[in-house]
Image: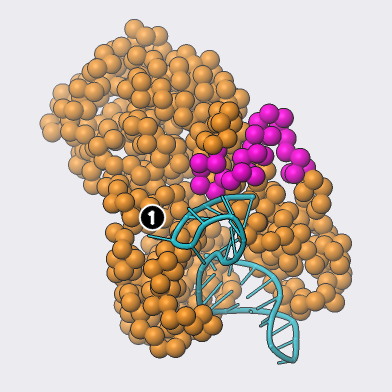
Amino acid sequence: MSSNAELAKIFYDMAAVLELTGANAFRVNAHAKAARVLKDLTTDVSTLVDDPKQLTAIDGIGKGTAERIIEYVETGTIADHRQLMAKVPTGLFDLMQIPGLGPRTIKTMWEQAGVTNMTTLRAALDAGTLEDLPRLGPKLLENIKASMDFVAKSSGRTRIGTALPLAEAIITQLKQVKGLKQIEYAGSLRRGAETIGDIDILASTTQPKQLSEAFRTMPGVTDVLGSGETKSSVRLDAGIQVDLRIVDDPAFGAALLYFTGSKQHNVRLRERAIRMKHRLNEYGLFPNDGDSKTPPQARGVNAVAAKTEKDIFKALKLPWIAPELREDRGEISAADDGVLPKLIEESQIKSELHAHTIASDGNFTIEALIEQAKSRGFHTIAVTDHSKSSAQANGLSVDRLLEHIDAIHEAGSKVKGITILAGSEVDIHADGSLDYEDDVLAKLDIVVASPHASLQQEPAKATKRLVAAISHPLVHILGHPTGRIINRREGLSPDIDALIAAAVEHDTALEINANFMRLDLRDTHVRAAVKAGSLLAINTDAHTASDFDSLHYGILTARRGWLEANQCVNTWSASKLSKWLKRKR
DNA sequence: GCCGTTTTCGGCCCGACTGTTTTCAGTCG
């Protein structure tokens, strides 16, 4: 783990302890925000401590946080953190993951019933010792039990590649219900986040009862968690919760904006609304008439804007901000200044530069791969099978590679309208050397260098290793730079800024691997690369035909990183791409 | 603890829902 990640965890922990000990909520929030900012930061904080002003210049990091960061970098520990951690049993942190159970209740259970972790909570529930505590009635205790079972069963957040098809299937089904007017998925799914907590679906209809009924009785529903007039929640056998919210059609935009989030983005928008003497909620943007007790919509106040998201942004004197940007990472001030990026779109992708055939571990013949690429409208497809060290993936020996190159060129000569590149996905060894000698690499039209083994290296070694690959004169693209697998494997934690600097210097592209298990580079890395002017490649790493569809997830990640088309080599014309590739030959 | 169109103090988003309660605390997004 990099020091940024370690520090982020420290601040998350401190926020949790403060919350559990009943500290001022804004102080809790400030710690959580500092943690979030540190987690997203691609610059190694240890390089910033010489000048504290560089730290406090970061939004959300003030004097106090800066001092603690410096303390951590200099001593490896933070006194405040140690003192806070001594105040509560760490097992309480696990309890905060139980839906419906918050810090106040946990504090009560800890102080008055000796609950310190999952095990003692389960025992207390079974023994009935919590029943006399204030505000803990039978229903709440029952809900806590059910939530604990759910947490035990579920694997936490769901990868977007699992959640999105589910959401689309549900929407297709609900569209059949009579009276439906509008329906969209919202939340982190609409923002294109790499993992999703639950699926939020928003609908307007003339027949709310029928729609709710259809939702609760869909195939795959295992539990109905609640079903009110406007909100129903279910759990699917896929282990994911889905919420349906039915809203008034004339306020659909306000509701969509609100339920898309992120929470922090919403807070920023509301602060802006207040400054403009307005008031924003999920029913619309209202004039602020000074009555803060009763919500404006309940008093019959007419909304200034509510029908579409665009209307609301416009009334706030902002252009529409794409959902992928709504993470409170500077998008509102960029919108205010008229410098929002013109985000890359899927239709602009014209080439696939990382794909496998049956020569290594893919399902395609060379011909089938070409066919697939043609059908997607690409002008170029690169055949990049694994190199010799990737034995588990049937990596090619030098002899096999040389034969493969001939076969690729021959297949390419037989088709028109598309360029076929003979390439390789070459392993980057732990020491940064590549899996083929330079004279072999020089025979290839394109080289994607990727780490596959030794993925638990220390950050400093990983940085050196990857920088060596990026700087290699025959390498075009650094493939899945960290090697992470979402929800399964952390991967390398190199100094991302160092990789980006090397990529800029050597004109090497950094890959956004679009496979939804990887999404590597991740969104925050992409953002840093975009800022520094590095080239990026969005590749699907296709092994089968359906893998080409995962391009969508790569695009979402790219958009979350504020990427514009011109900085992505896959959007370039065939001739521009070819020229770039040949500069390294 | 952070921050500044209310700028070094005094705010800090907003509403729904649930379950617990006779008026509201806690949680969620």
Main secondary structure type of the part rendered in magenta: helix
Q: Quadrant of residue A279?
A: bottom left
Q: Which chain is orange?
A: A
User: x, y percentage for residue A108?
Assistant: 80, 67
Q: Quadrant of the N terminus of chain A?
A: top right
Rendered position, A347 above or below A209: above
Q: Quadrant of residue A29?
A: bottom right
Rendered position, A97 above or below A500: below
- Viewer-proximal residue among A577 and A176: A577
What residue is at 57 percent from the left and 20 percent from the top? A461
Give the farthest residue toward the top: A439
Kind of residue indicated by mark 1: Ile
- Viewer-proximal residue among A55 and B6: B6
What residue is at 30 percent from the left and 27 percent from the top? A383
Q: Quadrant of the C terminus of chain A?
A: top left
User: x, y percentage for residue A253?
Assistant: 35, 71
- Which colour denotes chain B? cyan
Residue at mark 1: A332
> In the rendered view, does A383 fall on the left or right side of A417?
right
Q: Is residue A365 visible?
A: no
User: x, y percentage for residue A521?
Assistant: 44, 36
- Extent of the magenta region: A55-82
Rendered position, A53 above or below A23: above
What residue is at 52 percent from the left and 23 percent from the top? A463
Q: Is residue A279 visible?
A: yes
Graded by Cα atoms within 10 Å as few (under 14), some (14 to 19) or many (20 or more), the crowding at tag 1 reads many
What residue is at 38 percent from the left and 12 percent from the top? A398
